[in-house]
């Protein structure tokens, strides 16, 4: 499993999510909790991006092992990495 630019970018985005969670989020008095919250919600996207080859095996369909399209896994991974943590931190900060 080679270390690609996309995987490095995903790690950078994870770190930025943690920093933005601590800076922007104000749903808790503890900034470390807010950063950890943003990072924990980003981890599923990071795993999807990093383990795309393993996750592309969807299983047996009529006795044939089929692969998921890599573009679909990329879209899902980046959605979980960028959109989900941002929405949660934003929504929790409104109260």
Image (cartoon, rainbow, N blue to C red):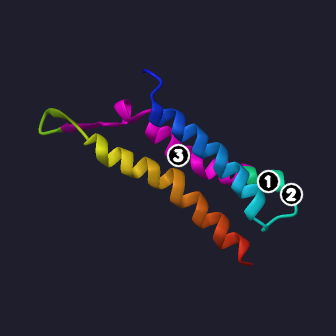
Q: Earlier in the sequence, mark 2 or mark 3?
A: 2
- Using the image as rendered, state which of residue 29 and residue 22 is in the foreground: 22
* Mark 3 vs 1: CB contact within 8 A: no
Q: Quadrant of the C terminus?
A: bottom right
Q: Mark 3 falls on what kind of element?
A: helix
Q: Is residue 33 above or below residue 14?
A: below
Cα distance between the residues tagged 3 and 1: 18 Å
* Mark 2 vs 1: CB contact within 8 A: yes
Cα distance between the residues tagged 2 and 1: 5 Å
Residue depicted at 69% across the width and 70% down the height: 92
Q: Estimate how packed mark 2 is, as few (under 14), some (14 to 19) or many (20 or more) residues with alpha carbons within 10 Å.
A: few
Q: How many marks can you see?
A: 3
In the rendered image, which residue does mark 2 sit on? 30
Residue 93 point in image, percent of width and height: 72, 71
Q: Estimate how packed mark 3 is, as few (under 14), some (14 to 19) or many (20 or more) residues with alpha carbons within 10 Å.
A: some
Cα distance between the residues tagged 2 and 3: 23 Å
Q: Mark 2 falls on what kind of element?
A: loop
Residue depicted at 50% across the width and 38% down the height: 47
- Using the image as rendered, state which of residue 13 and residue 54 is in the foreground: 13
Residue 4 point in image, percent of width and height: 45, 28
Q: Which residues are magenta?
A: 36-60
| Residue sticking out furthest to the front | 5
In the rendered image, which residue does mark 3 sit on? 44
From the image, give the main secondary structure of the stretch colored magenta: helix
In the rendered image, which residue does mark 1 sit on? 33
* Mark 2 vs 3: CB contact within 8 A: no
- Using the image as rendered, state which of residue 41 and residue 78 is in the foreground: 78
Residue depicted at 64% across the width and 72% down the height: 91
| Residue sticking out furthest to the bottom | 95
């Amino acid at each position: 499993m080679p270390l690609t630019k996309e995987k490095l970018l995903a790690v950078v985005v994870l770190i930025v999510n943690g920093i933005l969670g601590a800076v922007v989020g104000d749903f808790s008095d503890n900034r470390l909790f807010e950063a950890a919250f943003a990072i924990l919600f980003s981890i599923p996207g990071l795993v999807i991006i990093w383990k795309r080859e393993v996750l592309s095996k969807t299983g047996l369909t009529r006795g044939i092992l089929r692969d998921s399209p890599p573009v679909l896994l990329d879209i899902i991974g980046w959605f979980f990495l960028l959109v989900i943590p941002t929405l949660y931190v934003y929504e929790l900060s409104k109260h």
